[in-house]
């Protein structure tokens, strides 16, 4: 099942089930969040509740998207109650990339860079036996709900950025129940989006490079993620033509960690189990245009397409002006 959040022509929020190009509108709920919270409280499956709540009204996905009325597939009414986080060095990539990576991480551990040591740890211990805990991954914070762009909205980077590059990823979407436990609402395709040039200056700049916008959606896949996910990442020039394109792979078959292990190491902190909060957690990627020396320009469009997750995610790169930070003493 695919869920879509959007605004109707009058600006009211709605949520519906996407079937081909038709959105079957769910009655009694104005958001995925409200639907998920009710499912948690009633101890019923999200898909079952959504299916039972679908009414007769419909909307055209293409018309909603063309009018710019799509919303992220899960959000909170207060942006401060959404955590956007992620894990890196979790994906094996294509067969060629895997072979190259295994050669790099072989031999003397002490001769490896810190990044390669982290990748090796994941390969060796990121998929523990059932009931056991594996090695913890690299982890980063991106921001709150204010940084999340829906499909069709700009990914806007600050004018001090050295780069604005895509990261095609799968994100887990979660709601924390009244019992303080995380509930996975589903998965969505995402563009984690980072400043790779800043990160490459020194890996300790990773935190700075990740404090950027991100794109999520447009659809939310209810249930388990496919073990093998293949999609395509594209960049369209300002002339509307594709100027870079490459396949990307995700799902546990293409990862060095299980999703359960990544989830454990995120939600093991009480801070991330506050009742009512929303979490959007990116699981990582192995495909980047910057690796092919592509520099994306403002006005160009990112497209992340993985058919298992419904329609493609499309966002235009833009830049916003920043002022010198001024702190006033009280």
Image (tube, helix red, strand yellow):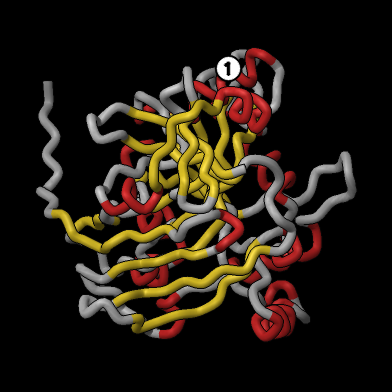
Q: Position of residue 129 (x, y in %)?
A: 89, 49
Query: Which residue: 35% across, 81% down?
Result: 242
The answer to whether 267 appears left or right of 300 in the picture is: right
* Residue shown at 33% from the left, 46% from the top: 64
Badge 1 element: helix
Q: Quadrant of residue 245?
A: bottom left
Asked if residue 296 is positioned above or below residue 187 in the image, the reply reads below
* Viewer-nearest residue: 283 or 265: 283
Closer to the camera in the image, 31 or 204: 31
Residue 118 seen anywhere in this rendered image of the structure: no
Q: Where residue 77 appears, x then y in whole percent?
A: 36, 24
Residue at left offset 60%, top offset 34%: 185
Q: Quadrant of the N terminus?
A: top right
Count of residue discs: 1
- Indicate whether 304 appears above or below 144: below
Q: Is residue 324 above or below residue 31?
A: below
Which residue occupies the foreground of this view, 309 or 116? Answer: 309
- Horizontally, is 123 left or right of 246 in the view? right
Instruction: Please give the residue where the numbered disc 1 appears in the rendered image.
Output: 38
Residue at 50 percent across and 49 percent down: it is 140
């Amino acid at each position: 099942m695919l869920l879509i959040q959007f605004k109707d022509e009058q600006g009211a929020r709605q949520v519906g089930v996407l079937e081909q190009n038709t959105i079957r509108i769910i009655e009694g709920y104005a958001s995925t969040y409200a639907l998920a919270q009710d499912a948690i409280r009633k101890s019923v499956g999200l898909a079952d509740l959504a299916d039972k709540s679908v009414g007769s009204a419909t909307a055209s996905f293409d018309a909603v998207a063309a009018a710019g009325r799509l919303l992220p597939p899960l959000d909170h009414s207060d942006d401060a109650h959404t955590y956007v986080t992620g894990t890196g060095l979790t994906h094996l990539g294509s067969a060629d990339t895997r072979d190259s990576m295994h050669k790099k991480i072989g031999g003397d551990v002490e001769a490896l860079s810190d990044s390669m040591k982290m990748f090796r740890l994941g390969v060796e211990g990121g998929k523990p036996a059932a009931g056991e805990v594996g090695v913890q991954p690299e982890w980063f914070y991106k921001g709150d709900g204010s940084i999340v762009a829906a499909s069709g909205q700009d990914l806007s980077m600050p004018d001090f950025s050295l780069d604005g590059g895509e990261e095609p990823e799968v994100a887990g979407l979660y709601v924390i129940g009244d019992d303080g436990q995380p509930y996975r609402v589903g998965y969505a395709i995402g563009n984690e989006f980072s400043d790779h040039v800043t990160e490459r200056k020194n890996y300790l700049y990773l935190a700075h490079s990740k404090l950027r916008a991100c794109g999520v959606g447009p659809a939310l896949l209810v249930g388990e993620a496919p073990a093998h996910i293949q999609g395509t990442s594209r960049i369209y020039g300002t002339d509307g033509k594709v100027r870079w394109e490459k396949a990307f792979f995700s799902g546990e078959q293409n990862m060095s960690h299980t999703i359960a292990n990544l989830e454990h190491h995120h939600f093991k902190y009480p801070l991330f189990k506050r009742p009512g909060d929303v979490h959007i957690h990116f699981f990582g990627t192995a495909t980047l245009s910057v690796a092919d020396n592509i520099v994306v320009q403002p006005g160009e469009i990112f497209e992340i397409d993985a058919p298992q997750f419904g329609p493609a995610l499309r966002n235009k790169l833009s830049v916003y002006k920043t002022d010198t930070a001024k702190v006033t003493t009280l």
